[in-house]
């Protein structure tokens, strides 16, 4: 099996993931869940996802669909379609699964997965995305990771606009 196919296999839907989830639960593996747009992958994303992966055995990344990104970020975003973004994130060795979701937030997906650990970026908490109160009764452990200062997709987009 070629490596490209192995990367594609990491991108899944809930129906197919349900079987993997049962396997992970049977093996008593700790499931870590996080989510995001991951529009232009940068050093901050790599650090965040690798640290999230270190917290458990299986890292599941919920990825906003294109329409979900537009609802959250507004016009002009995403820059890359979710097919491209999911392939890039899935190519990271420490990411086990990528699941694209249509909703404005990942609450339904998280409720389906019922991870052992939910990882959130400090920027999400500060910017008032879905609050801790929504998650605290649904996940055994919530970890907030600091973001790498100076790295964001919005900052990259702004720098590109200034160069044009």
Image: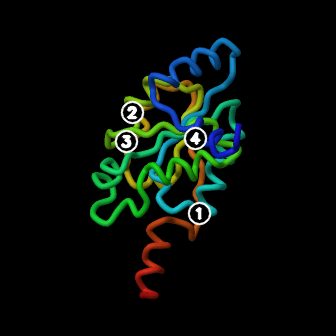
Question: Marks 1 and 3, how far apart in space?
Answer: 24 Å
Disc 4 versus disc 2: nearer the observer: 4
The answer to whether marks 2 and 3 mark residues whose Cβ atoms lie closer than 8 Å is yes
Callout count: 4
View extreme (top): residue: 26
Residue ID for mark 3: 130
Q: Residue at x 43, y 60 (%)?
A: 80
Residue ID for mark 2: 107
Label 1 crowd bin: few (<14), some (14–19), many (20+), radius 10 Å: few
Residue ID for mark 4: 8
Determine the image quadrant of residue 2. Answer: top right
Q: Nearer the viewer, residue 41 or 91?
A: 91
Determine the image quadrant of residue 106. Answer: top left
Q: Earlier in the sequence, mark 4 or mark 2?
A: 4
Label 4 crowd bin: few (<14), some (14–19), many (20+), radius 10 Å: some
Judge left or right: residue 136 versus residue 43. Answer: left
Q: Give me the disc on residue 42.
A: 1
Disc 1 versus disc 3: nearer the observer: 1
């Amino acid at each position: 099996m070629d490596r490209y196919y192995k990367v594609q296999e990491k991108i899944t839907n809930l129906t197919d993931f349900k079987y993997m989830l049962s396997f992970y639960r049977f093996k008593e593996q700790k499931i870590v869940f996080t989510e995001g747009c991951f529009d232009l992958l940068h050093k901050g994303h790599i650090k965040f996802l690798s640290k999230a992966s270190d917290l458990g055995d299986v890292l599941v990344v919920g990825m906003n669909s294109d329409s979900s990104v537009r609802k959250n970020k507004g016009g002009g975003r995403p820059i890359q379609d979710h097919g491209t973004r999911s392939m890039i994130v899935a190519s990271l060795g420490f990411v086990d699964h990528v699941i694209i979701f249509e909703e404005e937030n990942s609450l339904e997906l998280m409720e389906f997965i019922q991870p052992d650990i939910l990882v959130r970026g400090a920027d999400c908490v500060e910017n008032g995305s879905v609050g801790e109160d929504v998650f605290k009764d649904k996940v055994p452990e919530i970890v907030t990771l600091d973001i790498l200062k100076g790295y964001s997709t919005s900052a990259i987009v702004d720098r590109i606009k200034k160069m044009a």
